[in-house]
Image: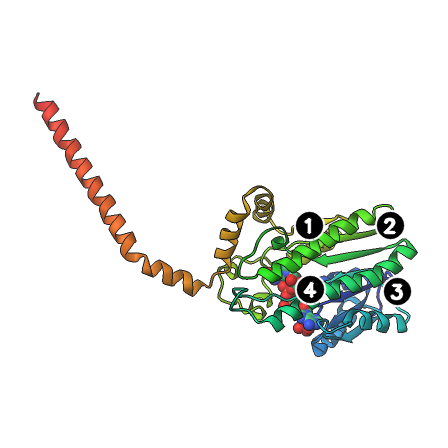
Amino acid sequence: MENKKGTGKTALITGASSGIGQELAKLFAQDGYNLVLVARSVDTLHRLAEVFELNYGTAQVTVIEKDLSEEDAARDVYERVQSKGIVVDVLVNDAGVGVHGKFANETDWEAEKSMIHLNVLTTTLLTKLCLRDMVARNEGKVLNLASLVSIMPFPLMTVYAATKAYINSFTQSLVNELKDTNVTITALMPNATDTDFFNKAGASDVLATDMVDDPVVVARDGYEALMSGKPKVVPGGLVNKAYEVMAYVAPQETMAGMMRYTLTPKSEIARKLDERKPLFWAVGIGLAAAAVTGITLAARNRRTLAAD
Ligand SMILES: NC(=O)c1ccc[n+]([C@@H]2O[C@H](COP(=O)([O-])OP(=O)(O)OC[C@H]3O[C@@H](n4cnc5c(N)ncnc54)[C@H](OP(=O)(O)O)[C@@H]3O)[C@@H](O)[C@H]2O)c1
């Protein structure tokens, strides 16, 4: 099928093989963008390329298989794109992972180092390389996947939240540096979203997975904010906006406690509730006894007053 509304523009999307990145890729394809899709799951990327060509008539899909947590991965991706003569009009830094557990004695340093490389270093260098060209052309857009937890403490995913705080700060400073150009940069700040993210982070059983947003909605809100050049967007409904406000006004300690609860395994919460059952019973029986005594005394009092 011919691309009926082909823009001739190209969007480079890292992490396009699943979740939010895949939904974003779909939106770009629907709007007639050519695509450069980057991730490790090359078979999935090729399948996506076929679907986009078939369904939306996407003129050109370039697949790059790359582990973006490797040293100089961003430079390699950039050089491969350059060597094909592709101009990146939109850069989406979506690829990212999380690591769950207590920092001091549960998480693995190699996993954390790889996450920092992927979430922070690769995003930073790829942005630098693409932004330099965009500023020279005085045209372009960048979307960085931050997170709602980029503005709050997130115990049990401590290093992950720190990487996203970096991305948010990095993005908001660049918003200012770019304000006299036609280049825009946007931070997408999703709350917990229904993707494979928590499974891969080793947190499949946590409470947060019960309250997840739809990646289709997250991608749509991110795409719209990117296209209108907004500096940031918290996708989804009012609850997420309330979280954002709370993060700015509530004491950090309170936020930390609340957010830690969402990352606590459900089995642990159930066990703690079980341990406290005798206490709940004791308090319940005490309250019931106090109520019965109160009612009895009140009734006796009323009878005495009536007899008087
Ligand atoms: N889901 C949430 O609750 C949530 C909330 C806020 C922010 N976010 C952020 O949203 C972004 C997308 O996450 P998601 O929820 O869509 O999770 P996801 O479904 O697990 O997708 C992650 C994507 O990143 C790619 N990726 C991971 N490690 C990579 C590596 N070493 N090299 C290259 N690509 C790699 C994956 O591709 P391959 O495995 O094929 O390489 C995949 O395409 C992440 O930056 C995440 O931090 C997610």
Q: Quadrant of the C terminus?
A: top left
Q: Front-most of 159 and 76?
A: 159
Look at label 3 and name its amino acid: Val
Q: Which residue extends farthest left? A: 307
Q: Front-most of 51 and 234?
A: 234
Label 2 sits on residue? 182
Q: Rate crowding at label 4 as few (under 14), some (14 to 19) or many (20 or more) other CA atoms within 10 Å.
A: many
Look at label 1 and name its amino acid: Val
Mark 2 and mark 3 lie on one chain; the one further toward the N terminus is 3
Q: Which quarter of the picture shows residue 196?
A: bottom right
Q: In what element is the residue under mark 1?
A: strand
Q: Front-most of 271 and 297?
A: 271
Q: CA distance from mark 3 to mark 4?
A: 24 Å
Question: Residue 233: which numbered mark, if any?
Answer: 1
| The residue at label 4 has a CB less than 8 Å from ligand 1 | yes
Q: Front-most of 291 and 31?
A: 291
Residue 236 in view of the camera: yes
Please tell me which residue is depicted at 68% across the width and 58% down the height of the picture: 219
Mark 4 and mark 1 lie on one chain; the one further toward the N terminus is 4
193 relative to 301, above or below: below
Q: Rate crowding at label 2 as few (under 14), some (14 to 19) or many (20 or more) other CA atoms within 10 Å.
A: some
Label 3 sits on residue? 87
Q: CA distance from mark 2 to mark 3?
A: 16 Å
Q: CA distance from mark 1 to mark 2?
A: 19 Å
Label 4 sits on residue? 119
In the shown orientation, is residue 53 left or right of residue 198? Answer: right
